[in-house]
Amino acid sequence: MRRHFVLALAAAALAGPVLAQAPAATMRTFGDVAISPAGDRIAAVETDEPLGPTATRARGPVVVRDARTGAALASYDPCPVCRYSGLAWSPHGEALAFIAFDPDKTEATLDVLRDGRVRVLATVEGVAQTPRFSPDGAQIALMATPGAHKETGAVEAGAEQVGDIGALTVADEKRIGVIPASGGEIRYVSPADTFIYEYDWRPDGRGFVATAAKGNGDNNWWIAKLVAVDLDGSPVRVIAAPTVQMNAPRVSPDGRTVVFIGGLMSDFGSVGGDIYTVPLAGGTPIDVTPGIKASFTSLAGWRGGRLLGTLLRGDRAEIVAIDPRTGEVDTRWSAPGSARAADAQASFSADGSTAAAEVQDFTHPPEIWAGAPGPRFVALTRVNAALSAQTDARSVTWKSDGFEVQGWLLAPLNVTAGKHPMVVDIHGGPSSAVTPRYVPPYDEGIFPVTTWLRKGYFVFYANPRGSYGQGEAFTKANIRDFGGGDLRDIVAGIDKVESIAPVDDARLGVFGHSYGGFMTMWTVTHSHRFAAAIAGAGISDWVSYYGENGIDQWMIPFFGASAYDDPAIYEKASPIFSVKNARTPTLIYVGERDVECPPPQSFEFWRALEAAGVPTSFIVYKGQGHAIRDPSDLADLRERNIAWFDKYLGG
């Protein structure tokens, strides 16, 4: 017997020229997709990801393709050990800038492709990202962290902290630097004590708008301010200091208005919120899209008087045009998939008529899509055409406490008779959402979904309250209620799934990493419904966590006060105080240098489970951060995850 759970993009998605295919043992990914101003060429970092064990992280060259045929025009790999990022075309398309980063040396170069040759314009002993040409093309700006002690971001492994901690003055500050497009020295124009998160050139080319905060860059994005930075060295001017978190600041063509995405966001880089506007001269930001039942996820800038960007509306990713004066949103493309591009989720030509992005869903592997947003926005490449679907997938919706909740159900390709085990994967954040990404023929990352599907497991991803895609009221619905309403949403989703799929309620597993790790710890201490659990980089005690983690600023918007000012709400949400209720066998893992969810939280929960007589196992991965990067560690973790659920769920 076969049951079909099909998620498909439009049939036109697979139309397009058949090009040279990636080897069967790999899957091509297209990073930092950037379309030229004229819309005639598309550049991307093309990486062949091994579909099997590997000892190193994959990397690939910068490839330039014809935007009409998809044919590869040229490939550039000037640094065979570097990872490339930040692809950015010059205003007239005659040059392409990008960053080459050597992780072994912790060294970055600003490279420019012009006339078929790549030239190194500048070198940073540290890390760098996001190069952008000035409006006249005469200068290139970038963000750089000279002398960086770690890769940028709280998910990366933290720097060693030994000695007199209170006396340590080491701080990695990411600054805006400017260099002539013809080459020269980098001139840093933002202050040395300020961390820049994102920036945009002002139309007059005399400076930038940016989101910025003083002090530890990992910790202070949640209280960042919108600022103006001038090339002439004038003091940084605060434009606005909103209580929402900000992403993607963009300046209007007349230079009078700044637009940004604002909302309740738990992690830098995980974007969702409403559209806000504020005068460049300064003032109070105005939400111009209040009440929209969707979350804006990126802004590419103005084209033809409209602001182009992307949003998540329920189970669909959309390319949209926004009128920032009225808040009117015009949907130009919509599909149940995921899109990404350089510095946004879609890249646009100078006139906005053509877009490009890497697009995929659960059953279709990544390809470059291009064309006018709408029916003509289709797959341009067929590099991964040899890769077939590994699952049947469907979007599922259900009601919970008056909310409309959405999730994704993955089924084995051939569902045999009888009831099947199911793994429930709780996403991190909590401000995030599971969106469709291709399930490859071989396990990747932390979650061995391919193996579980082949063993007959169903896999369920829920987007409970606190997630993106349903509007800001939904995203804010778990404030001061971690583990409460969101767990009820997930349980209601399981009930819905069991009504439409042959899932065995006695063989449910729960899995989560980061906030999902907390939710897993919370679930096993507040429910006996699950037969096994895996908690990755979790949080067992919010009170002690407040003093241990490197990003305590993120907690204030969600708890309303610090743990020192309102410890009761932190204690109420802490699984450790309910651990005597736990019965579920639980595997726990964490990175040794996790800044976001430090190892003591996992140690504490593991010891408590042992004391309660609950079957448990605990692994700490040496040198790893919140994101487990080492391929051998990932392979080890996947094998442990498979064995744990096989033991208790019986695939």
Image (cartoon, grey):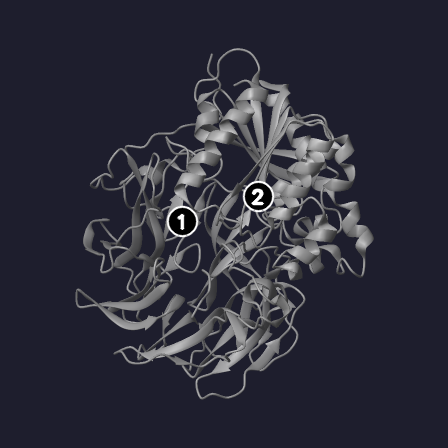
Which mark is drawn over residue 374?
1
Of 220 and 629, nearer the camera is 629
Calculate the distance from the C-alpha at mark 1 to the C-alpha at mark 2.
19 Å
Query: Left or right: where does residue 135 sit relative to residue 209?
Result: left
Residue neighbourhood size for the residue with mark 2, other residues' Cα within 10 Å, grouped as few (<14), some (14–19), many (≥20): many
Q: What residue would you read off at disc 2?
A: 314
Of 81 and 458, nearer the camera is 81
Vertical order, 147 against 191 (above or below)? above
Of 420 and 582, nearer the camera is 582
State how many labels appear. 2
- Report the amino acid beneath label 1: Gly
Residue 538: x %, y % from top left: 62, 43
Residue 355: x %, y % from top left: 36, 56
Dividing the picture into quarters, in which one does residue 115 lie? bottom left
Residue 441: x %, y % from top left: 37, 30
The residue that appears at 74% across and 41% down in the rendered structure is 576
